[in-house]
Image (cartoon, rainbow, N blue to C red):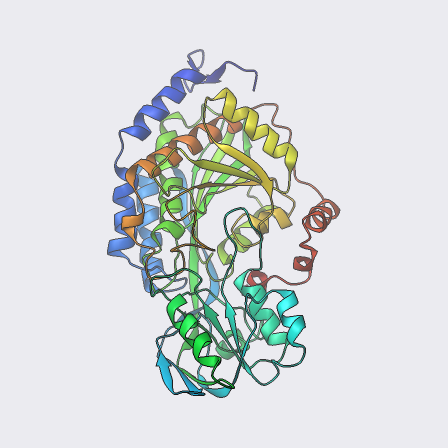
């Protein structure tokens, strides 16, 4: 990062780093494009559930915008997958009192009728299931959805679901831990990954989501006697396709090396998915627009990717990462930047999370200081977003997210509920994130001394073990949903 200049397309003409950063910042802070694109994704196309017509049309829109902004090699990188369509969901307590509750099916829940005694496992952590022993077998499990507060690391929804399946439960009910009469949603993994029939890609047992208020009522009523519930679900799973939307800003003398910036554009079918993650997708798109005038002036190629199907198993990033991991013509990937959660809030509260790599964290901490960017940095490992497949393939990766008004809420806040809507996202937050990401990406793309390279599988295993997440070496719900 010692070089003072970036090369221009015009031979001897040089553009200073400060000059380009000023142009990036000025363009970002005077642009309404990201908010306009957010409105198109959320208000015009709606939920953009993976494999749906809405997602397909949203991908075509993002493709057209990349072309309009001047990105090169713009294309839809299509991959096969199994999509899902929501039908009716009915939940009622039959004992000790009769009472029905509003509920929704979790994606990939199949169809059927289920009635059994209800077993409450509280937060659904490993210790909670161990405490009930064999009591869940043949029963319907009741558990909180994600319970982590800011700064905490607790079990993911799919961890709790897998415990319920392994305990022999016949269904699982998830309670949203945030008040507001909001159902909680989230995809489940296939019961027979790789199977030839659509039914193989349905979940092993039904999973349904209910509100905080419904869960509190069920728990109160259950104190009156031995509780039993009845569930009826009607849904369908079908073969479809999705696409990653890809566009390049070609580099100079190191054009075969790539800095990849990506954010998923799909969402859950019960909401607009504005903060999770339309905001991140339009941030990636805006970074492409901001940097397009300087294409060729950076040493490395900058690639913008809007991922499909993150919410149902990171399917787009599993597909994309394979193109770099094998003997493919996609070039030498030097860094993956995941924008899941970018662009939320009022701006100025960006966080860079290096994936289980303190040295990479230190690099970005120093880089942010040199650019006079007020961002927090950390080293952590999440296995549930689009950087993870790249991490598993050994590539350096970071996530850039933005704090928002839900930072004090439990778990995902408004995410994965009906309330993840456009009114929760603001133009200033989108502008701030795009400016920060663009300046960081430009600096890394032109850093001749960028020291981080792909590591071998043994190094990946060691980092997983250090993070106490080595179980994902054998099983990851998203990889289980991949269709070859």
Relative to 158, say whether 78 is above or below: above
Relative to 176, say whether 10 is above or below: above
Quadrant of the frame with the N terminus: top right
Where residue 445 appears, as percent x and y from the top left, is 51, 29
Residue occupying the far front of the picture: 224
Where residue 7 appears, as percent x and y from the top left, is 47, 18
Foreground of the two, 290 or 475 = 475
Where residue 338 appears, as percent x and y from the top left, is 49, 44
Where residue 335 appears, as percent x and y from the top left, is 56, 37
Relative to 256, say whether 457 is above or below: below
Foreground of the two, 252 or 373 = 373
Residue 70: tell me if it is visible. Answer: no
Residue occupying the far top of the picture: 12
Foreground of the two, 298 or 390 = 390
Residue 289: tell me if it is visible. Answer: yes
The residue at the point 31 percent across, 36 percent down is: 428
Relative to 474, 90 lies left or right: left
Quadrant of the frame with the C terminus: bottom right
Say how many tags the image has. Answer: 0
Foreground of the two, 236 or 89 = 89
Relative to 451, 83 lies left or right: left
């Amino acid at each position: 990062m010692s070089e003072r200049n970036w090369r221009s397309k015009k031979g001897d003409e040089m553009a200073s780093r400060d000059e380009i950063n000023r142009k990036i910042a000025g363009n970002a802070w005077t642009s309404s494009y990201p908010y306009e694109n957010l409105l198109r994704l959320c208000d015009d196309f709606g939920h953009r559930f993976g494999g749906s017509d809405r997602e397909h049309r949203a991908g075509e829109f993002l493709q057209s915008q990349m072309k309009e902004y001047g990105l090169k090699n713009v294309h839809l990188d299509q991959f096969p997958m199994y999509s899902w369509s929501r039908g009716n969901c009915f939940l009622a307590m039959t004992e000790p009192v009769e009472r029905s509750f509003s509920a929704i099916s979790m994606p990939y829940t199949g169809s059927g009728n289920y009635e059994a005694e209800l077993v409450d496992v509280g937060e659904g952590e490993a210790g909670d299931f161990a405490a009930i022993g064999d009591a869940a077998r043949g029963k319907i499990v009741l558990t909180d959805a994600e319970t982590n507060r800011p700064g905490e690391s607790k079990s993911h929804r799919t961890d709790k679901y897998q415990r319920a399946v392994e305990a022999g439960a016949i269904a699982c009910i998830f309670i949203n831990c945030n008040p507001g009469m909001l159902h909680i949603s989230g995809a489940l993994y296939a019961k027979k990954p790789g199977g030839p029939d659509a039914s193989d890609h349905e979940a092993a047992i039904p999973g349904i989501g209910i509100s905080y208020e419904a869960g509190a009522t069920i728990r109160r009523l259950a104190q009156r006697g031995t509780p039993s519930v009845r569930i009826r679900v009607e849904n369908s799973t079908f073969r479809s396709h999705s696409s990653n939307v890809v566009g390049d800003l070609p580099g100079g003398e190191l054009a075969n090396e790539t800095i990849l910036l990506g954010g998923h554009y799909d969402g859950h079918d019960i909401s607009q998915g504005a903060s999770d993650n339309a905001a991140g997708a339009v941030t990636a798109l805006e970074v492409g627009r901001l940097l397009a005038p300087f294409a060729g002036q950076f040493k490395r190629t900058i690639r913008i990717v809007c991922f499909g199907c993150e919410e149902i198993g990171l399917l787009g990033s599993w597909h994309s990462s394979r193109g770099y991991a094998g003997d493919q013509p996609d070039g030498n990937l030097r860094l993956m930047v995941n924008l899941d959660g970018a662009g939320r809030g009022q701006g100025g509260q960006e966080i860079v999370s290096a994936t289980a790599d303190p040295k990479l964290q230190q690099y970005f901490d120093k880089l942010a200081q040199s650019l006079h960017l007020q961002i927090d940095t950390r080293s952590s490992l999440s296995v549930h977003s689009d950087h993870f497949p790249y991490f598993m393939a050994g590539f350096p990766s970071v996530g850039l997210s933005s704090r928002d008004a839900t930072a004090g809420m439990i778990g995902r806040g408004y995410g994965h509920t009906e309330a993840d809507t456009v009114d929760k996202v603001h133009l200033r937050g989108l502008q701030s994130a795009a400016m920060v990401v663009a300046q960081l990406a430009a600096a890394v793309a032109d850093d001749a001394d960028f020291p981080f390279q792909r590591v071998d599988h043994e190094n990946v295993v060691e980092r997983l073990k250090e993070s106490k997440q080595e179980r994902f070496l054998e099983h990851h719900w998203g990889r289980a949903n991949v269709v070859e």
